[in-house]
Image (cartoon, rainbow, N blue to C red):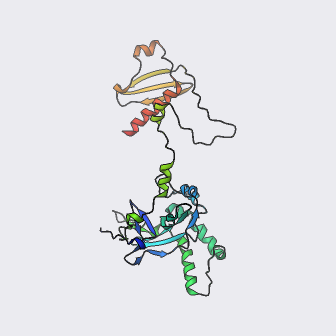
Amino acid sequence: MALVVGAAEDVYPVVAFSKSQFSVRTRGANAIKTPMKKALQITEATYKQIMTNKGVPSRAAAKWEGLITLNNVAELSGREGTYPYIAFDVVGHPLQKNKLIPIPSDVATRIFPKLYEDASNNPSKYGLKLDDLDEGTRARHQARLDIFTWVPSNCAREDADGKSKPCVISPPLNQWAQCPTAQQIPNLGKEMAADAPAVASKKTAKATGKRKHSSIELPEGIEESNEKLPSMVSRVVTLDTKGAPYKIVEHNGIVMVTMFKSPQSVKGPSSSQQRLAPQAPVDEEDAMDEEEEEDGDEDDD
């Protein structure tokens, strides 16, 4: 499907879709069913809060509380139906206010009903003029309120089986104009994730001897320690039952069992060693690391 590239002076606002950005104003038409009043100004930290590491909106409704208002939400229309989008004026990034972000349906279904009910009962609290003498003013304000009656079934397309499936609007399907490269707005969420300190993998941590700190919040009075536990004598036994080998590590009342895919992958003591002599001391941390790596290898298969 051919895409029409929009003129630079007539591009904004835009929406991101796949790896491109598209203008909601195309060929003189306007895909905005209900425009927003104004983008909500927020800080970088708040913007990062509602974005995942891949720069896409989080589906956790709790992170959006207080950020969805009657002023910064617009409703776009396409062949699939209508869908709500939101905009933020991020401090230090003036272009972001021209980028419309699709509100995840999970978030909308949690927040919209409460906001609609409160605004309907207290229109003046939200600056709504539902009883204004001017008919045009009443209609515009009612339309802004009606956005919050949206449900996922308002935007859907048929799948391969002919069943209606909720979705977001597809700009290419609706032949929206593609935004010129020079006018595309940076993916701020993805940039923030790229600037964040990288977390070392388990294998890297083992190679460097460095381990990442736990992100779990500890109870008051409890401190995390990096002190290595002393080596203790453990008993390592290798079994082979019906061709399925296992390695059992018993330590301090805890038994760890690992199943191997072939006898060749088991490196354990001989049968005589198992019967006659205890094994060399096994460090608990090294044993658990070995178990984790072997489990990881099996998952990769």
Q: What residue appears at the point 44 percent right and 16 percent down from the top-left corner?
A: 274
- Residue 57 percent location from the top left of the image: 49, 58
Q: What residue appears at the point 53 percent right and 26 percent down from the top-left corner?
A: 284
Dividing the picture into quadrants, the one containing residue 65 is bottom right
Q: How many marks?
A: 0
- Residue 214 percent location from the top left of the image: 57, 39
Compared with 44, 76 (above or below) is below
Q: What residue appears at the point 42 percent right and 65 percent down from the top-left corner?
A: 183
**Residue at the right extreme, as displayed:** 221
Q: Is residue 21 left or right of residue 196?
A: left
- Residue 104 percent location from the top left of the image: 49, 61
Of residues 227 and 294, the one nearer the viewer is 227
Dividing the picture into quadrants, the one containing residue 60 is bottom right
Would residue 41 be seen by someone viewing this image from the given angle? yes
Q: Is residue 123 left or right of residue 267?
A: right
Of residues 283 and 164, the one nearer the viewer is 283
**Residue at the left extreme, as displayed:** 1
> Which quarter of the image is occupied by the C terminus?
top left
Would residue 166 be seen by someone viewing this image from the given angle? no
Compared with 152, 195 (above or below) is above
- Residue 119 percent location from the top left of the image: 62, 73
Of residues 12 and 295, the one nearer the viewer is 12
> Which quarter of the image is occupied by the N terminus?
bottom left
Of residues 186 and 54, the one nearer the viewer is 186
